[in-house]
Amino acid sequence: MRTDERPSSPSRDDVSENAASAQPKSSNLIFQTALNGLSVRAGAGCPQGFRFWNNAPRAGRLKAVTIGFMNTFSCPLPPLGGVRPSYLNLPCDLSLAGTPLADYLCRRFPYVPRETWLSRLAAGGIFDASGRPLAPDAPFVPGGRLFYYREAVAFDEPEIPFREEILYADKHLLAVDKPHFLPVVPGGRFLRETLLTRLRLHPELQDADPDGLAPLHRIDKDTAGVVLFCRRRESRRAYQMLFQARRVEKSYEAVAAERAGMTFPLHIRSRIERGEPFFLMRETGGAANAHTVVEAAEPLGGGLARYRLRPVSGKKHQLRVHMAALGLPILNDPLYPAPLPDAAPDYAKPLKLLARSVAFVDPFTGKRMCFESGRGL
């Protein structure tokens, strides 16, 4: 970690909840040329069809042409209870073609009993890429894609006893004040108790494009504050470009131990990578990819202070990692500097981190927008 006291000049497998917005659609490509000079590569890198690679040297690169039945990625199923279907990409393994799909699912998810897969198939709960339910004897299709709805009864999902507040809504944009403990999107054991699912079911938002609502950035489940959502698929890119160009101003507040003698602004630059366990982040050597500015500190008494933080970059857990690296871990942080034993969340002790405000110039109106959380720490 490098600090500078000088002024300165957003369990992994192939399953995704955001099936309809995970990728842009693309046109199906019809293969109409001879296979001379082309070779087929099938496997994990070919989730949507077969790839033919031009073997002729051209600037030292191989040119890939994707063809097949799944080059167009669109979700054929509507949300159910505010939750989009998940999807599973089947590998392009030609040796499995025609074998029972249930056999592959049992190998892919060994912790799920075979009877469960057969029951879900018999009930019409697993769908192909066109939205047709698959039968229990359905064959494996290399490069195919399956859709299904996660079952809330399959895991113990806790109810989050705090509510979000809608700060602003127009036809393109939604600004929401998220409470502590509520995840932004479904994942892990959280399916319905997430901000995205709640908003999809919100009575004032039913006129919006059901597939268009998507977060433009994320904040941690443990963090409260402002989160922006796009309401239309065709509007999403304009807002995403603002984040990519770092033209969105984000301000956070955090409560941590007071330290005398600090000079502001304090710039923290370091490299943050995924750690162990997988849900933790850690600082490593190498070129910095994370930059936080500690802009000020307000004494609160009792040896605590409220710090104003500005993330220049947007790495996962960045503010929590950087404050812990300063020797000032955020109050009630269950993960940093060291994770606490697994336990039910203590709603009386939320992480003292708040996404206080988000500001930017709206790409559609040209107006400067600023949204502030009304929550306190």
Image (cartoon, rainbow, N blue to C red):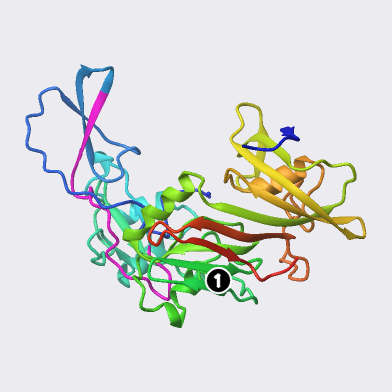
Which residue, as the protein is rendered here, is positioned at the far front?
Answer: 367
Residue 40, image x and y in percent? 21, 31
Q: Nearer the viewer, residue 356 or 315?
A: 356
Determine if residue 155 is in view: no
Is residue 288 shown above or below 168?
A: above
Q: Which of these two is toward me, 105 or 192?
A: 192
Tell me the crowding category of disc 1: few under 14, some 14 to 19, or many 20 or more residues within 10 angstroms, Cα based.
Answer: many
Q: Would residue 143 be visible to someone looking at this image?
A: yes
Q: Which residue is mark 1?
A: 193
Quadrant housing the N terminus: top right
Q: Is residue 58 above or below residue 3?
A: above
Residue 151: x percent and y percent? 46, 69
Left or right of 262? Residue 209 is left
Q: Residue furthest right?
A: 302
* Most common SS among magenta residues: loop
Looking at the rendering, which quadrant does residue 65 occupy?
A: top left
Q: Quadrant of residue 167?
A: bottom right
Is residue 78 inside the magenta stretch?
yes
Q: Residue 322, image x and y in percent?
A: 71, 43
303 relative position to 26: left or right: right
> What amino acid type should be assigned to the residue bearing mark 1?
Glu
Q: Is residue 109 left or right of residue 58?
A: right
Q: Quadrant of the C terminus?
A: bottom right
Q: What residue is drawn where x is 88% and y is 46%?
A: 259
Residue 150 vs residue 339: left or right?
left
Q: Secondary structure at mark 1?
A: loop
Q: Magenta region: which residues?
A: 62-85
The question of residue 261 being in magenta is answered with no
